[in-house]
Image (cartoon, coloured by chain):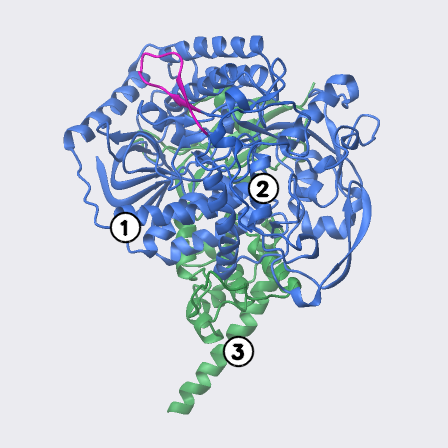
Chain colours: A blue, B green
Amino acid sequence: MDTFYTDLLCVGAGLAGERVAVAAASAGFETICLSIVPPRRSHSSAAQGGMQASLGNCCMGEGDCPDVHFADTVKGSDWGADQEVARLFVETAPIAVREMAFWGIPWNRVVPGKGIYYKAGKQYDKIEKDEKEGTIAARDFGGTAKWRTCYTSDGTGHTLLFTMDNEVVRLGVTVHDRVEVLSLIHDGTTCTGVVARCLKTGKLRTYLAKATLIATGGYGKIYRESTNAVICWGDGGAISLDTGLVPIGNPEAVQFHPTGIVPTNILVTEGCRGDGGTLKDVNEERFMHIYEPGKQELASRDVVSRWMFHHMRIGKGVPSPYGPHLWLDIRHLGAHHIKTKLREVEEICNEFLDVDPITQLIPVRPCQHYSMGGVRTNKDGAAYGLKGLYSAGEAACWDMHGFNRLGGNSLAETIVAGRIVGEKIVEFLQGYQGEFKTAVVQDAVKKQQERIEGLIGGSGKESAYDLRAAMGDALMDGVGIFRKQEDLQTAVEKLQVIYDRSKNLGLHSTSTYGPNPELGVALRVPGMLRLALCIAYGALMRTESRGAHAREDYPERNDKDWLKRTLAYWKSEKDTLPTLEYEKPSKVWELPPGERGYGSSKIICTEDPEICVPKPETN
Amino acid sequence: MGRNLKFNIFRFNPEDPASVPHMDAYYLEETVAMTLFIVLNRIREEQDPTLMFDFMCRAGICGSCAVMINGRPDLACHTKTKKLPSEITLMPMPVFKLIGDLSVDTGTWFRGMNEKVQSWVHTNKVFKPNEEEERMDNALAEEIYELERCIECGCCVAACGKANMLPDGFMGATAFNRVARFMMDPRDERNNDQYFEVVGNDDGIFGCLGLLGCEDMCPKKIPLQDQLGMLRRKMGFSQVKHLFQRAGKK
């Protein structure tokens, strides 16, 4: 069996993984990135709209600064964020955007003079200042006080990922693509690498590393309807959870994006609404201004998704063979704008819907989009529970998003967290001598070999595809946009039954040669189910509404009892439910809990003196 | 009732000593808005779990799923069956190393390409975290983005007569497009002579036969022909200059 040794092992080579790799390689540490796909195909590439950073260059962003970005982020999180981390993030974001410009991103730039923009379907004038000509421009996004989202047309993730991978190539970082990680190697206190499977040959490998980073992105694909790519099954979270030592933070915090197209759930960017697109119902009438007179279409994603769902529930949806949907209207933005600033949207509509967005309405409905939860880390990106294990990006619960992430803050997180966590890993590696225990490694390998042999040679009858579909249905039906006791209870029970069935998985294709795609699915389904149970059980136990977690039976945000972060552990292999623990979301309360300014939610106030007393204003 | 579709799919597992290359036929009834993404996943989940193919974003953005569809390379995810005849033949892309069935190793090929053309901004400057960004005209940024849109799917390479003749050598239109992208970027300090070192040879721009399968098959409709023309002109000029310099030295 092939064994590879390295200083840093990045599991996942999307934006976060590669940014960390760049930091380590720049400091002279040997780095290997593992990726299920060639790195430039990572799901980071699908992020369209942009990346938030408070440069304040464009006229609609004037007066922006990290403080305003901080307040937007914390309000967006519904006070679930770690405020120390959010502060670190907003302070670093402008630097990270400029660094990406230095490395070659063709950011859209400020064009001086008079221009027009649309808001809530109406046209307005704006005048960009001459002295800002050629600086990095920004567009409007939901839940923000200023235009802050830096962009390259609607291919921002694509340009960021290609530019980041250019750096990876320049620095000569080793990338092993088509490698899937099956388990972490650890002795109960320290993580020393992974057991992985090569998806070109099907052979097992071990990677031994002084530091291991989980940067595998989100786990949207455990839901039936998700904007996520087909590889977003949450392997990094699953293998971390499997250790019994590393918790998943806030698994129940799952974001639904307002505009997935119907029926394929492909995302069309929030930039559509940011640039002035509107949502319309069966009568082709706008409705968001009724529910959210202030922010209208540009309230935060959780709020807009909920009102859309509500509007469909009261019968205002457009009937279709795929169930009711609503319309996204960007026609008034005009052909020039769509063809330059929203060209991916145009292409997606043309190719996947046969819809011309310049002249026609786009059928949309909210669907699963982002995992705020993930491998719980401290502010340095170090995972709870195991030394030498780190996490960054969507895979992590670092936790700047709390219970709702703002549009444009995920791309920003990948680059910013990558930069910060990368530096912390470099500090960790300096002078650190890893110790690789052969017995531990052999045990970890043997366990995976036995799993594979059990699947290929076993007598199991359950189809991995069937179980995956049943899991997606259970989550979609029970742990969706609106949640309540009985639905959540049913979802948990269904998932437990499916999890039990997963112990009897069998394969039709018993070839031991090559990657065997069916074996791949069978190997990952049990881990996906454990994550699904963390989500459903976490949601069942959280008897309040906060951000994307909206309980119909507990509509108020309960800061008194629930201003805390869920930590879901899978303590024993025999368990059929996670063990939930809780911690305070933040050590620092720069912005004490209050009203978000959008979304209608009653608040039960906290009595915790540490949280209530704000720090004196520093500016 | 939709049409009854027949799919002839290339099968070969190079890891399996007993496997020989052959075609297998599968049948599916056409459904509304059916794409090859739906077709291939249904075949694998319902008929043949051993079938190997690649998808990632399923939205035409990531470039994972390029295959030969009735002889022409295209992204499987955005290919609708209604635009195809009822008998559809799917083959893996040529030039790239076969992993199995429809799956090919584009990752290794493109990493090699990126190394060859040194696909990064070459600069002697050092990033200064606390300084304002260097300014750029928005029109130029948009021009760069136009070429930056390549998703490295490999369609232009699979459609290239020269790359099919010289699978290990010829750089292909994707590489020329990348070079053109950096030539246009003022942040990259390379001069034409340095670019000439990279592409001014028979594996590079002078090896192009001008068949333009690349331009026709690019699923992102990147203006590849223009880049080939521009590069050939500029590199031709550099070549002439080199000749004169050499003659001058003699």
At numbered mark 2, what does the secondary structure look like: helix, strand or loop? helix
Q: How many marks?
A: 3
Whether the residues at callouts 2 and 1 have beta carbons within 8 Å, the answer is: no
Q: Dot 2, how many residues are within 10 Å of its Cα: few (below 14), some (14-19), or many (20+)?
A: many
Mark found first going from the N terminus, 2 or 1: 1
What label does residue A30 carry, if any? Answer: 1
Subunit under mark 2: A
**Magenta-colored span:** A566-584
Task: Point out residue A487 in the picture as x, y percentages from the top left corner.
Answer: 57, 10
Q: Which residue is mark 3?
A: B237
Q: Which residue is mark 2?
A: A71
In front of the other: A164 or A582: A582
The answer to whether dots 3 and 1 both sit on one chain is no
Nearer to us of marks 3 and 1 is 1
Query: What amino acid type should be assigned to the residue bearing mark 2?
Result: Ala
The answer to whether B75 is drawn above or below residue A255 in the figure is below
Quadrant position of the N terminus of chain A in the picture: top left
